[in-house]
Amino acid sequence: MTGQAAIEVVAHRGSSAVHPESTRAAYRAAVELARRTGHRVELEGDVHFSADDQLVVLHDLTLRRTGGRPDAVAELTVAELKQVDVGSWKVPDPTPEQRELITFAELLDLVAGARDEGVDVGLAVETKHPTARGLDVDRRALEQLADRGWTRPGAPVRMISFEPRAVALAGKLAPALRRSLLVEKDLGPWADGHLPEGVDTVGVDHRLAERHPGWVDRLLARGHRLHLWTVNDTEAMRRWLDRGATGLTTDHPDRALAVVHGDPVPS
């Protein structure tokens, strides 16, 4: 494998193989992995509005899967959301940090605190669409990042979305930030290997990429960066790195770091 120093390891909703996804525990574990190994880890999270106009971090639009109740995230305030147990579906008797939903501001605090201590962590912020408030979620996320100085060149942040308009808005409002277009079910208008203006990275479901090797060739030939998600098998990680992938999004960031850096793979 070549050029591995440039390969990004992205902790999908935190260290979500071990801890309930998108909780402080999952993100803290990813931070501690970066601290312990000395290797960079990027924390990935999805942001939504709560009923009281705050950004919270959760993949789904509702609490059904992780919280065991049908409410939409947007229907509850942060105080109400924090009363929902989003950990017991994953682990028995979760700790408070495994049980409680985290806000975007709290995640930013966690990343900032780690970076202040010299830990090499970054953040991949995914905005979900369609939503009732359209691109407002992108604007708010970028505002909160700007408040911390994290829209300047060299900021430890990447904006990612399946929605091309969201990617374009990030380019307009924060042109210094890295941006990734996500692709899942089909290649659509990107089948020839080009990406939207100013975007040099595509994040793609590894199963879709496996079905379209010619597209992968075209993408890489154009000099674009290829991130695969969600890759949890170590042999698949090695295959994609040999193929030219520049990023691995995984529930097992410890495995991915080991593969990328040639260390023993944890069991």
Image: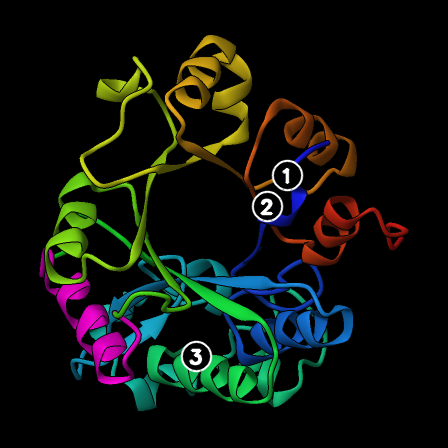
- Evaluate if marks 3 and 1 touch, with contact meaning CB atoms under 8 Å apart: no
The magenta stretch is 133-151
The residue under label 1 is 3
**Callout 2 amino acid:** Ile
What is the x, y in percent for residue 37? 76, 68
- Is residue 137 in the magenta section? yes
Q: Is residue 154 above or below residue 164?
A: below
Seen from the viewer's position, the closer of residues 68 and 99 is 99
- Magenta part, dominant SS: helix
The residue under label 2 is 7
**Callout 1 amino acid:** Gly
Secondary structure found at label 3: helix
Seen from the viewer's position, the closer of residues 89 and 19 is 19
Q: Residue furthest top?
A: 214
Seen from the viewer's position, the closer of residues 152 and 14 is 152
Q: What is the crowding at mark 3: few (fewer than 14 residues within 10 Å), some, or many (at least 20)?
A: many
Q: Is residue 117 left or right of residue 108?
A: right
Seen from the viewer's position, the closer of residues 2 and 135 is 2
Secondary structure found at label 2: loop
Real-space CA distance between mark 2 and mark 3, rounded to the nearest whole angstrom:
23 Å
What is the x, y in percent for residue 85? 51, 79
